[in-house]
Image (cartoon, helix red, strand yellow):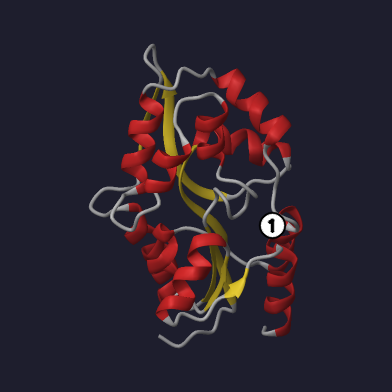
Amino acid sequence: MKQTKGWAAVSDFDGTITLRDVGDHLLLHYGFSDKKTIEESYSLKVRVEDFMKRAFAGARLSEEVIAGFVREKVKARAGFSYFIFFCERAGIPFEIASGGMDLYADPFLKKHGVKVKSFFGRARVVREGIRITYPFLKRMDLSSFKASRVRRLKTAGYKVVFFGDGPNDLKAAGTADKVYAAGRLLKLCRERGIKASPLVSFTRAAGFIRKNS
């Protein structure tokens, strides 16, 4: 299909919109996991959604504790709020596709005064810890789902900018028209010949879209 609608954007959340992976940070800070276990979770063979379910199953954290942690310790990547308002003014569809959970994403977005179409794990505090489900993952894993969101927008006639930082973002990066990558994803893109710009700030992405619209 001929692309005539301009740009759209899809982004990962943990370590992309935020400077640190919030789930990892919570697990380490409160002692529910260790660095070795978390590092192993970034293998291309590990499904993020499966790791999150296991890791938080025994994490006895209340909604209040998580929200307070987000307010005090979770930092946004430079230009994030600006980029959201830029997209709103320019009529650019923007959505978040993440293996993270709503218990920390919602207070983060509220803190920054933004509302975004988003897909997060649905979390519920139970006696043993936190139970996470992914209603939007019906017949595919998270990595494939992220790529499907990019393809959906491309089929609708948009060129798509994708933002990510982890191995589970690789399929989406390989599908997008423009990629901004941080951390492990940037390394993987370079190894596989996928063109990607370093994700330093979302302001740079706004400048790219403005220049190429």
| Residue 156 visible in this rendered orientation of the protein | no
Nearer-the-camera pick, 208 or 169: 169
Quarter location, residue 132: top left
Furthest-bottom residue in view? 2
The residue labelled by disc 1 is 84
Write the residue at 54% across / 48% down. 14
Q: Secondary structure at mark 1?
A: helix
- Residue 151 in percent (x, y) is at 39, 71
Write the residue at 31% across / 48% down. 137
Quarter location, residue 113: top right
Quarter location, residue 36: top left
Q: Answer above or below: position of 83 versus 5.
A: above
Nearer-the-camera pick, 18 or 117: 18
Furthest-top residue in view? 127
Furthest-front residue in view? 36
Say which quadrant the N terminus sits in. bottom left
Q: Answer above or below: position of 200 versus 207.
A: above
- Residue 135 in percent (x, y) is at 33, 41
Write the residue at 32% across / 49% down. 47
Say which quadrant the C terminus sits in. bottom right
Q: Is residue 143 left or right of residue 198?
A: left
Q: Answer above or below: position of 126 versus 187.
A: above
| Residue 90 visible in this rendered orientation of the protein | yes
Amino acid type, callout 1: Ile
Q: Is residue 156 left or right of residue 13?
A: left
Nearer-the-camera pick, 196 or 188: 188
